[in-house]
Amino acid sequence: MGLLSGILGHAGEISIEKLSEEFRPILVEGEQLEKAFKVIRDMWVFTNKRLILVDKQGVTGKKIDYQSIPYKSIIRFSKESTGFLDLDAELKIWLSGSHEPIVKEFSKKANINEVYLLMSQHILD
C-alpha cells in the first residue's frame, strides 16, 4: 500500500501472518484469520466467524478499539469496483438495526472481488 493511497483512506491488503500474535488473545477456539486490510493504522480483519474493525487511536496508537461484527448481523453488502479514472473500489456493509452502511475504500491493488467472495461465502451460508 502506498503512502498516498493510505492518506486518501484506501485500504491495502496486509499479511495475516504478521497479525497472528496481535489477534491471538481475542480469537475464540476454532477461529482463524483469513484476510486483512489496512489504512494507515486502522484495519479490517476477516476471520472465519466475524469481521473485526480495528481503530488505533491517539498519537502512539496504543489505545485500540476492536469492533466485532458477526457475519449473521450483516443483512446486505455491495461492492463498487475501480473504473478508468476512479482508482478506488468501495465496499458497503449494512448491519441489522442500522440504516447507514459501513463504507470502506480499497486501493486498486487490493482485490475487492476476493473480499466480496469471502463475505459471500460466510454470509450466504
Image (cartoon, rainbow, N blue to C red):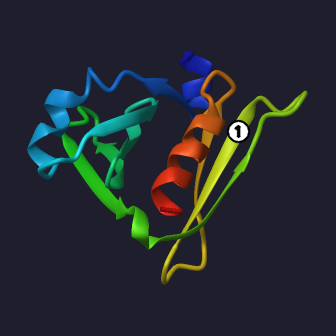
- Disc 1 on helix, strand or loop? strand
Q: Residue at x 30, y 44 (%)?
A: 57
Residue lying at the far right in this picture: please name it: 84
Answer few, some or many: residues within 10 Å of disc 1's Cα (few below 14, many 20 plus, some between 14 and 19): many
How many tags in the picture? Answer: 1
The image shows residue 110 at horizontal and vertical percentages of 60, 27
Residue 59: % across, % down: 28, 35
Q: Residue at x 28, y 41 (%)?
A: 58
Please state which of residues 100 and 59 is positioned toward the viewer in this rendering: 100
Residue 56 located left or right of residue 8? left
Name which residue lies at 51% across and 44% down. 118
Q: Is residue 22 left or right of residue 69?
A: left
Q: Which residue is mark 1?
A: 89
Furthest-bottom residue in this view: 97
Q: Quadrant of residue 8?
A: top right
Q: Position of residue 24 (x, y in %)?
A: 13, 38
Q: Nearer the viewer, residue 4 or 101?
A: 101
Q: Residue furthest front?
A: 125
Question: Where 93 falls versus 46 (above or below)?
Answer: below
Q: Residue at x 61, y 20 (%)?
A: 4
Place of residue 31 in the rendered image (x, y in percent of width and height, measured from the top left): 22, 47
Residue nearest the observer in this picture, 36 or 116:
116
Q: Amino acid at mark 1?
A: Ala
Q: Quadrant of residue 15?
A: top left
Whether residue 93 is situated above or below residue 90 in the rendered picture: below
Specify whether 71 is left or right of 117: left
- Work out whether 99 lies above or below 107: below
